[in-house]
Image: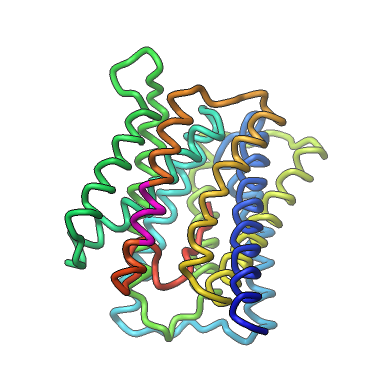
């Protein structure tokens, strides 16, 4: 298989992963409209844990002995993922899917900035300008202090912050830690957090249709994870990574078709600014021979 074919496959895998994550988000938004959030997290988490365990056993990649450093970063990563999941799903329950997806597109910019500040990775003037422009795009989406401001947008921004912490911790894990083990431990932690919150939100009967939606959410979540790993391992990462922005297109389409929600002009403008600056930042890294905007390990997400 030549490099051009591999790059086409990588772009296809990344696009398919974003579609799978968008379907998962759509299913969870529909489910949490009827079920308490904690209950939905538990019901989705159980089949996800079973699937990841099966994948890990069949691949022979499950391993639970880590160095002290890996245990520390794995703990930070897991805690960050739990909080990121709770804040993301809380925001998703109360705001349009496309709006939240647009906010989440600022993640590569936030990772780049945080890597510069925390990990002391070099960020030049041009990339800092692009990051600043990207965050101005986020302000167009959130619109603080205006009639269009939604406080749930702040919860969405909090999710971005915790995802940044998760991805920075992921970057510090050694190559001895299998990805499927990280994903399994994270799924267990997220599900356990949901179970701990059940007494506060209650537990209600589940209609058969919601059971199917929950199972679909779990299936597409696992599919998205596997696809994004495949995308990062085939072809050139600089070709695959920009296709992560197709997530917004899928979110707009599903939000319109399923919930009859369509983002307004300012949201679309802000999203376009965020995406444009994110792609510029990534290709600037490529030109300089570095990849900062995308973690060196595939971003394991269990939201």
Q: Is residue 117 magenta?
A: no
Q: With respect to residue 100, does 195 lie above or below?
A: below
Q: Position of residue 170 (x, y in %)?
A: 38, 69
Question: In the orientation shown, which residue stands out farthest toward the top?
Answer: 147
Give me the residue at 66% from left, 75% from top.
Answer: 5
* 97 or 195, nearer to the observer: 97
Report the side of 136 relative to 185 (left or right): left
Report the side of 238 relative to 10 (left or right): left
Prevailing secondary structure of the magenta residues:
helix
Q: Position of residue 137 (x, y in %)?
A: 35, 35
Q: With respect to residue 120, does 210 lie above or below?
A: above
Which quadrant holds residue 148?
top left
Give me the residue at 68% from left, 66% from top.
Answer: 50
Question: In this picture, which residue range is highlighted in magenta?
Answer: 277-283
Q: With respect to residue 23, does 34 lie above or below?
A: above
Give me the residue at 35% from left, 32% from top.
Answer: 154
Q: Position of residue 247 (x, y in %)?
A: 56, 47
Report the side of 300 relative to 211 (left or right): left
Q: Position of residue 228 (x, y in %)?
A: 57, 65
* 126 or 185, nearer to the observer: 126
Give me the residue at 29% from left, 58% from top.
Answer: 112
Looking at the figure, which quarter contains the N terminus? bottom right
Q: With respect to residue 123, does 303 lie above or below?
A: above
């Amino acid at each position: 298989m030549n490099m051009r074919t591999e790059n086409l496959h990588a772009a296809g895998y990344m696009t398919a992963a974003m579609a799978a994550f968008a379907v998962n988000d759509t299913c969870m938004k529909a489910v949490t409209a009827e079920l308490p959030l904690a209950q939905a997290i538990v019901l989705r988490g159980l089949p996800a844990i079973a699937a990841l365990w099966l994948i890990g056993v069949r691949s022979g990649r499950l391993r639970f002995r880590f160095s002290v450093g890996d245990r520390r970063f794995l703990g930070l990563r897991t805690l960050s993922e739990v909080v990121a999941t709770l804040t993301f799903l809380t925001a998703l329950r109360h705001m349009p899917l496309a709006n939240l997806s647009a906010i989440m597109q600022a993640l590569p910019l936030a990772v780049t900035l945080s890597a510069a500040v925390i990990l002391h990775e070099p960020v030049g003037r041009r990339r800092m300008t692009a990051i600043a422009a990207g965050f101005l795009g986020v302000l167009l989406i959130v619109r603080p202090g205006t009639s269009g401001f939604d406080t749930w947008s702040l919860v969405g921004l909090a999710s971005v912050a915790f995802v940044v912490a998760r991805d920075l911790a992921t970057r510090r894990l050694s190559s001895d830690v299998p990805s499927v083990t990280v994903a399994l431990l994270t799924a267990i932690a997220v599900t356990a957090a949901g179970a701990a919150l059940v007494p506060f939100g209650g537990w209600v009967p589940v209609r058969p249709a919601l059971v199917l939606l929950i199972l679909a959410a779990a299936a597409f979540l696992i599919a998205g994870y596997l696809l994004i790993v495949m995308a990062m391992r085939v072809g050139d990462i600089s070709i695959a990574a920009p296709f992560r922005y197709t997530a917004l297109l899928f979110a707009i389409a599903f939000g319109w078709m399923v919930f009859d929600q369509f983002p307004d002009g300012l949201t679309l403008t802000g999203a376009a600014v965020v995406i444009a600056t994110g792609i510029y930042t990534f290709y600037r890294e490529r030109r300089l021979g570095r990849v900062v905007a995308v973690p060196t390990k595939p971003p394991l997400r269990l939201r």
